[in-house]
Image: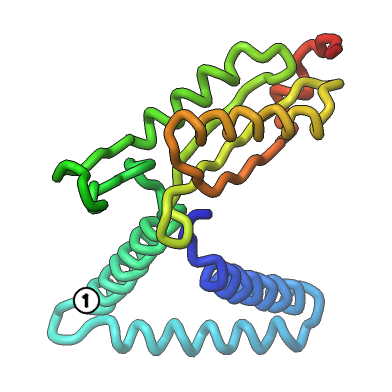
């Protein structure tokens, strides 16, 4: 539901993996193949000599300044990349402008917190659930609910999904608005280590 750039993330992870594999292969080759070790030492020696010759010009060590700027640029790009992850949360669940003939002018807004809290209260007393989380996201131009429930061991997932869907339908009737819903049933560590109650 969120607007995380998954394709970009996969490309960046793939490139990062290739760089790590190449570095690992080069390290293994330098450790196991004598010719590769000699080549590595020659390249590193020439690179060190070139760095020393470029590092000092007129008494100023500008190479360290350049490296600092490169690392600052990389840090900025990483912060921007982290900022675009997981976007799509919204604070409004329903927003009606009252544009129909005969309706009073104005706007009626039901916040996402109201819908989320209504479902959380209905789910928190269920003995067949360890935990439940409800969040609201923007999905194809409208508000959508994501309900994640953690059943106890022994609870029937089909029955849990059916009863959660019934709660959502009741909420639709009360609010007079039908929203897209994603129901996610997960088995986390807390559900695995919690005492299993008998579910009738």
- The residue under the point 59% across, 26% down is 132
SS assignment at label 1: loop
Q: Residue 199's x, y, as percent?
A: 84, 13
The relative height of residue 134 versus residue 180 in the rendered view (above or below) is above
Quarter of the view holding residue 32? bottom right
Q: Give 14 or 198, whichever is nearer the viewer.
A: 198
Display colour scheme: rainbow
Q: Residue 20's x, y, as percent?
A: 64, 70
Q: Give 174 or 116, whichever is nearer the viewer.
A: 174
- The residue under the point 53% across, 82% down is 44
Q: Give 125 or 151, whichever is nearer the viewer.
A: 125
- The residue under the point 82% across, 22% down is 155
Q: Give 163 or 153, whichever is nearer the viewer.
A: 163
Q: Which residue lies furthest to the front in this view?
A: 102
- The residue under the point 29% across, 66% down is 72
The residue where tag 1 is placed is 61
Mark 1 neighbour class, 10 Å CA radius: few under 14, some 14 to 19, many 20 or more? few
The relative height of residue 125 versus residue 155 in the rendered view (above or below) is above
Q: Residue 17's x, y, as percent?
A: 64, 70
The relative height of residue 29 versus residue 95 in the rendered view (above or below) is below
The relative height of residue 98 versus residue 189 in the rendered view (above or below) is below
Q: Quadrant of the C terminus?
A: top right
Q: Residue 127's x, y, as percent?
A: 71, 12
Quarter of the view holding residue 70? bottom left
């Amino acid at each position: 539901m969120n607007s995380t750039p998954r394709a970009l993330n996969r490309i960046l992870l793939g490139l990062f993996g290739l760089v790590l594999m190449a570095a690992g292969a080069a390290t293994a080759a330098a450790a196991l193949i004598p010719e590769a070790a000699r080549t590595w030492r020659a390249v590193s020696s020439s690179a060190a000599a070139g760095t020393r010759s470029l590092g000092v010009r007129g008494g100023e060590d500008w190479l360290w300044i350049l490296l600092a700027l490169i690392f600052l640029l990389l840090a900025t790009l990483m912060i921007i990349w982290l900022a675009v992850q997981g976007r799509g949360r919204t604070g409004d669940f329903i927003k009606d402008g009252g544009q129909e003939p005969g309706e009073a002018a104005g706007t009626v807004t039901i916040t996402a917190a109201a819908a989320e809290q209504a479902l959380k209260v209905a789910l928190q007393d269920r003995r067949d659930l360890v935990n439940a989380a409800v969040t609201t996201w923007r999905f194809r131009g409208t508000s959508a609910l994501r309900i994640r429930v953690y059943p106890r061991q022994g609870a029937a997932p089909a029955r849990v999904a059916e009863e959660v869907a019934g709660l959502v339908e009741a909420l639709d009737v009360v609010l007079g608005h039908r929203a897209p819903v994603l129901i996610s049933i997960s088995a986390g560590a807390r559900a695995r280590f919690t005492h299993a109650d008998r579910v009738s």
